[in-house]
Image (spheres, helix red, strand yellow):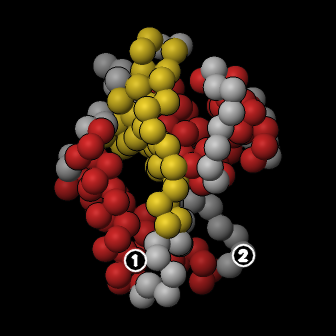
Amino acid sequence: MKPSVILGLDPGTHRLGYAVLKAQSPLKFQLIDYGTKEVPPKTHTLESLVYIRKVIQELIDKYKPELVSVEELFFNKNLKTAAKVYQARGVILLTLAERNLRLIEPTATQIKKGIAGNGRATKQQIKRALQLILGLNKLDGQDDSWDAIAAAFVGYGMC
C-alpha cells in the first residue's frame, strides 16, 4: 500500500534537510513543509547527535509519516567528513527503527534520475524539476531542503 505522508531527509554534518510530502493521488503531491535544521555552531559531536535525534523525533511526532526516505550516502574523498555524516545518519536510522517506520534509502543518482531524468543533474536542475513536478512558482531555502524533497518524492516511487 502506498503511503500518504512521506518524510524525506538529507543528512549532513551541520545541517539536516527535511521535507514532508502528502500524496493526494499517485501523480499529485502537496508539499506540506520543508526546510533545513542547523546544528548550532561550536556544538560538540555528541551534542550534535542529540540535537539531530530531537529534530527527527519532532518531525515524526508533528507529521506522522508512513514512509521515510533517507538519501544513501556516498563518499570517496574526505573520510573525516564522511565519518561525521555517517554518525548523523546512524542516529537518524536508529530513531526511525525505534518508531518502527518504513524506510527507503535511494542513492543520490537514483534521486537525480527520478527527479530530473539525469543521474548527474545539478542542484539547480533538481530545484527546477521539483518546481515543475509540484507546481510551485518558487522554491526557497537551501539545497539540503531541496534534496530532502527529492528524496521524499523518489522514495514514494520506490515503495
The residue carrying pointer 2 sits among few (fewer than 14), some (14 to 19) or many (20 or more) residues within 10 Å by Cα, namely: few
Q: Nearer the viewer, residue 137 or 103?
A: 137
Q: Can residue 74 be seen from the camera position used here?
A: yes
Residue displayed at 52% across by 56% down: 36
- Relative side of 36 to 104, left or right: right
- Residue 155 location, x and y as percent? 49, 35
Secondary structure of the residue carrying tag 1 is helix
Q: Which residue is mark 1?
A: 48
| Amino acid type, callout 2 | Lys
Q: Which of the 4 image quadrants contains residue 25?
A: top left
- Relative side of 30 to 127, left or right: left
Q: Quadrant of the N terminus?
A: top left
Residue displayed at 79% across by 38% down: 125
Q: Nearer the viewer, residue 66 or 35?
A: 35
| Amino acid type, callout 1 | Ser
Residue displayed at 41% across by 25% down: 22
The residue carrying pointer 1 sits among few (fewer than 14), some (14 to 19) or many (20 or more) residues within 10 Å by Cα, namely: many
Q: Nearer the viewer, residue 90 or 55?
A: 55
Q: Which of the 4 image quadrants contains residue 139?
A: top right
- Residue 37 location, x and y as percent? 47, 60
Secondary structure of the residue carrying tag 2 is loop
Query: Disc 1 vs disc 2: which is toward the camera?
Result: 1
Tag of residue 77: 2
- Relative side of 33 to 74, left or right: left
Q: Earlier in the sequence, mark 1 or mark 2?
A: 1
Q: Quadrant of the C terminus?
A: top left
Tag of residue 96: none
Residue displayed at 65% across by 67% down: 75
